[in-house]
């Protein structure tokens, strides 16, 4: 089963895709900003952002610890050009259906790649210390270090 090795999270994240000083008035603004970062990374066509809203309207992408992981529906897969991650930090938290979100991690993945990416991200985001470090990150190096730590922990 381990044949399909998931790409390292850090390999999917360009330095320009880490934005630590974003602002959004609403959940939808935050989703749009996350999608736009994926567009600017060359990972998706604009139409994928609609699929991100479809996903959010059917099931919240809030995962706890002040983090949401907006991503598109299966129908949006055709809009994905390349697997990529973006990380946006909102120093002023966004109201996400009654939860405060300080960080969004946008995912674009072809095929079923998003499942492996989501499981790797979950191992960081479900750890309160790592999630707090991500919410407090002020440099791209801090974000890379946090994401790289899961790449090394995968052999247990």
Image (cartoon, helix red, strand yellow):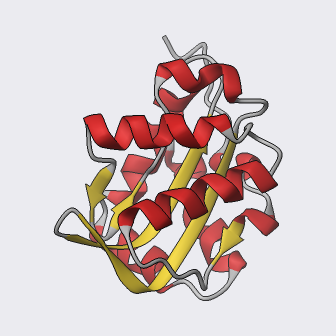
Q: Nearer the viewer, residue 13 or 6?
A: 13
Residue positioned 53% across, 39% down in the render? 50
Looking at the image, how many numbered discs can be counted on the residues? 0
Left or right: 20 as drawn, with respect to 39: left
Residue positioned 77% across, 33% down in the render? 82
Q: Is residue 127 above or below residue 50?
A: below
Quadrant of the image for the C terminus? Answer: top left
Residue 69: tell me if it is visible.
Answer: yes
Q: How far across and down, in percent of the image, does residue 93 sit?
A: 36, 82
Residue 155: tell me if it is visible.
Answer: no
Quadrant of the image occupied by residue 146: bottom right
Left or right: 53 as drawn, with respect to 20: left
Q: How far across and down, in percent of the image, does residue 131 sit?
A: 38, 70
Left or right: 123 as drawn, with respect to 97: right
Q: Nearer the viewer, residue 97 or 103?
A: 97
Q: How far across and down, in percent of the image, does residue 143 sit?
A: 61, 71
Q: Nearer the viewer, residue 32 or 120?
A: 32
Residue positioned 49% across, 57% down in the render? 31
Q: Residue furthest left?
A: 98
Quadrant of the image occupied by residue 145: bottom right
Residue positioned 72% across, 54% down in the render? 13
Q: How far across and down, in percent of the image, does residue 65 sit?
A: 27, 68
């Amino acid at each position: 089963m381990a044949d399909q090795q998931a790409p390292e999270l850090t390999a999917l994240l360009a330095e320009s895709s880490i934005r630590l000083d974003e602002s959004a008035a609403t959940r939808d603004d935050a989703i749009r900003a996350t999608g736009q970062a994926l567009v600017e990374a060359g990972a998706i066509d604009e139409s994928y952002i609609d699929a991100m809203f479809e996903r959010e309207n059917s099931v919240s992408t809030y995962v706890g610890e002040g983090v949401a992981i907006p991503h598109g529906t299966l129908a949006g897969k055709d809009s994905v050009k390349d697997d990529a991650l973006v990380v946006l930090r909102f120093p002023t938290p966004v109201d996400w259906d009654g939860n405060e979100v300080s960080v969004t991690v946008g995912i674009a993945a072809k095929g079923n790649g998003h499942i492996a990416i989501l499981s790797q991200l979950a191992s960081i985001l479900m750890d309160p210390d790592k999630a707090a470090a991500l919410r407090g990150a002020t440099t791209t190096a801090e974000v890379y270090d946090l994401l790289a730590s899961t790449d090394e922990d995968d052999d247990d």
